[in-house]
Image (cartoon, helix red, strand yellow):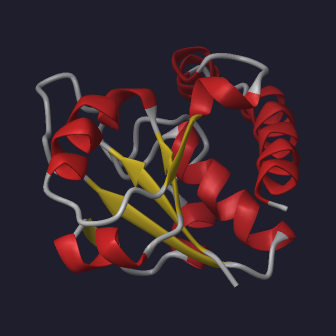
Amino acid sequence: MKTVLFLVQTHLSSCSLLAAEFVKVTDQQVLLRGTFAWQSQEMSEYSFEGMSGSAIEEEFSEFRQLQRKELEEVQCIVVSESAEEALIHLLKSASTTPEVVSIRDLGGKRESELDDLLMQGQTEKALNDIKQKSLILLEKLN
């Protein structure tokens, strides 16, 4: 069984929702971790209309910063676009190199487009794309 790590910059994002969706379709261990390299444009936890992050919190009750030992234990990292630079830096100090999958590698809408849809309250459109990405990711890992 693989351990799949979703690395995000913000807790409430389309990549976090992808992690919550992926948990439903896989038997692999799934972790959600943050880079905590917060930027001023970070969305607040309540910025998605009609969503408080409950889908994410249901699957991942604890959201914390990635620890180096976790980086050594994962076989695959799914990285949000905003966390890619931080991941490059983190991997320099790792003794192993896990498979890295960027959100953009999964086709469909760009992560920023999905975040925009979520912020505009178009949750269903975003979730349909996220579900497709989840299935593509499952295929890639099998």
Residue 123 appears in view? yes
- Compared with 6, 125 (above or below) is above
Location of the C terminus (image quadrant): bottom right
Q: Residue furthest front?
A: 95
Residue displayed at 14% across by 39% down: 38
Task: Tell me residue 80's x, y (percent).
Answer: 45, 36
The image shows residue 93 at horizontal and vertical percentages of 13, 56
Q: Quadrant of residue 32?
A: bottom left
Q: Position of residue 120 (x, y in %)?
A: 59, 20
Up/down of 59 relative to 6, above or below: below
Relative to 59, residue 19 above or below? above
- Is residue 98 rendered to the left or right of residue 66? right
Q: Position of residue 2 (x, y in %)?
A: 64, 77
Q: Quadrant of residue 136?
A: top right
Q: In the image, what residue occupies the spot 34% across and 64% down?
A: 96
Q: Nearer the viewer, residue 141 or 119?
A: 141
- Residue at image location 81% in from the left, 31% down from the top: 129
Q: Could you tell me how many numbered marks the image carries?
A: 0
Which residue does the image show at 86% across and 68% down from the upper left? 25
Query: Would residue 121 be seen by someone viewing this image from the given angle?
Result: no
The quadrant of the picture occupied by the N terminus is: bottom right
